[in-house]
């Protein structure tokens, strides 16, 4: 599992969560790929934790 903490200020709504997903999904995918290559283990879950929203957002 990869959890990336974000401090971006976004609207406290589904729209704010979508902005974070759009902004950071590629970054988390690269992290997952690098971790898999380094460890040989599969990353089962990628999560952005937003301090502004006070919740985690699962990245597909």
Image (cartoon, rainbow, N blue to C red):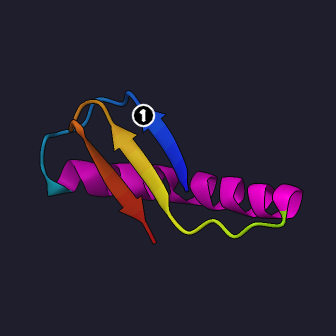
Give whichever of 8, 35 is nearer the camera.
35
x, y percent for residue 16: 23, 48
x then y, percent, for residue 40: 84, 66
Q: Is residue 34 above or below residue 52?
A: below
The residue under the point 69% across, 70% down is: 42
Residue 20, position as x, y percentages in the image: 37, 49
33 or 10: which is nearer to us? 33
57 or 8: nearer the viewer? 57
The residue positioned 69% from the left and 53% from the top of the image is: 31
Q: Quadrant of the N terminus?
A: bottom right
Q: Is residue 23 above or below residue 4?
A: below
Report the number of numbered marks. Answer: 1
At x 61%, y 52%, the residue is 27
Q: Is residue 19 magenta?
A: yes
Residue 37 versus residue 54 in the image, above or below: below
Say whether residue 36 is magenta. Answer: yes
How far across and down, in percent of the image, does residue 28 sit? Answer: 59, 54
Question: In this figure, which residue is indicated by the disc labeled 1?
Answer: 6
> Left or right: where does residue 31 sit relative to residue 1?
right
Residue drawn at point x = 78 percent, y = 63 percent: 36
Q: Quadrant of residue 12?
A: top left
Q: Which residues are magenta?
A: 15-39
Which sits in the foreground, 29 or 1?
1
For numbered disc 1, what is the local secondary structure?
Answer: strand
Q: Is residue 13 left or right of residue 9?
A: left
Tag 1: Cα neighbours inside 10 Å, few (<14), some, or many (≥20)? some
Most prominent secondary structure in the magenta stretch? Answer: helix
């Amino acid at each position: 599992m990869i959890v990336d903490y974000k401090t971006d200020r976004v609207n406290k709504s589904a729209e704010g969560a979508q902005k974070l997903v759009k902004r950071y999904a590629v970054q988390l995918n690269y992290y997952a790929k690098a971790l898999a290559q380094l460890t040989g283990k599969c990353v089962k879950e990628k999560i952005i934790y937003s301090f502004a929203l006070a919740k985690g957002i699962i990245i597909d």
